[in-house]
Image (cartoon, grey):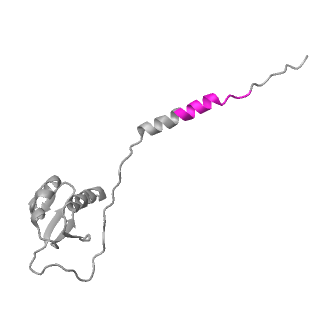
Amino acid sequence: MAKVRVSRRRLSMTPLIDVIFLLLLFFMLTSTFSKFSEVELSASGAGGTTPPDVPPIFLQLMSEDLRLNGNSLPLSALPVSDLSTAEIGTPVLISLGDYVDAQRLTDLLVALRQLEGLKITVLGAS
């Protein structure tokens, strides 16, 4: 019996390129492109230039609530609160409650960035 000669065709690259293009298009359309912003943090120094007669403002940040000197308020109302009329150099002490994530703290710091002249200190966990 004679051997049957099988001829091999060359593999076409066109379907492979099409698949790669479709995958690229899929991942580009399903990705989210977020704009990341910086939040400036500075270490506290030994002494500051806080006016001696200015009492500090106490902010308590919890996972669902925000309290300004003991009064509950939403995060969106922070720029029109008592902080907007605070003197330059007024210390703001931020206490973090249980289960506060980094995004919630960042949202608070971004909201406080709109108010100039405040001396912000984030207190450590107890």
Farthest right residue in view: 1
Q: How many marks?
A: 0
Q: Position of residue 39 (x, y in %)?
A: 31, 62
Q: Position of residue 120 (x, y in %)?
A: 22, 69
Stretch of the chain drawn in magenta: 10-21
Q: Position of residue 7 (x, y in %)?
A: 80, 23
Residue 124 visible within the image: yes
At 48% from the left and 35% from the top, the residue drawn is 25
Displayed quadrant of residue 20: top right
Magenta stretch holds residue 124: no
At 84% from the left and 21% from the top, the residue drawn is 5
Q: Main secondary structure of the magenta part?
A: helix
Q: Nearer the viewer, residue 125 or 106?
A: 106
Magenta stretch holds residue 19: yes
At 27% from the left and 80% from the top, the residue drawn is 45
At 19% from the left and 65% from the top, the residue drawn is 116
User: Position of 28 compared to 80: left or right?
Assistant: right
User: Position of 37 compared to 3: left or right?
Assistant: left
Displayed quadrant of residue 56: bottom left
Residue 99 visible within the image: no
In the image, residue 97 sits, relative to residue 44, either above or below, namely: above
Displayed quadrant of residue 77: bottom left
Q: Position of residue 73 (x, y in %)?
A: 11, 56
